[in-house]
Image: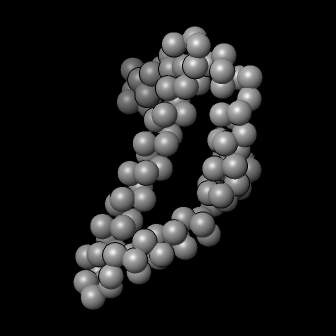
Amino acid sequence: MTGQEIQNEILRKMTPTQKLGLSMRLYYSAWEFKAAWLKEIHKDWSTVQIEQEVKRIFTNATLDISGEAISIPELEQKISEYHLSDEWEKARNFD
């Protein structure tokens, strides 16, 4: 079994709540890595400048989800809407 097949099997076994949690952890990890990289290359920037630049980068970023480009703010909106939906409640109560 290849690494990709193992990863796919793990993802198939995850609940929607687990997948959402994983995606959010990856998102925030990427945010932290970007901030750390910016601090390294812009040693003279303040924390506020770093945070503003990371926010600018992430706001203008897009993801390709199932062949559909989506911006980070649009993804955050979809996640917020999902949290308010009946599906979220069902998924939370399933665990």
92 vs 41, left or right, is right
Is residue 12 visible in this depiction of the protein? Answer: no
93 vs 8, left or right, is right
For the N terminus, give its image quadrant.
Answer: top left
Please name the residue shown 27% across and 88% down the image.
Answer: 44
Which residue is at the front of the view, 20 or 69?
Answer: 20
Residue 74, quarter of picture:
bottom right
Please name the residue shown 43% across and 51% down the image.
Answer: 28
Q: Is residue 50 above or below residue 78?
A: below
- Name the residue furthest top: 94
Q: Is residue 55 above or below residue 32?
A: below
Which residue is at the front of the view, 89 or 18?
Answer: 89
Percent from the top left, x then y, of residue 29? 38, 51
- Name the residue furthest bottom: 44
Which residue is at the front of the view, 52 or 59?
Answer: 52
Please name the residue shown 39% across and 27% down the image.
Answer: 2
Residue 7, quarter of picture:
top left
Percent from the top left, x then y, of residue 22? 46, 35
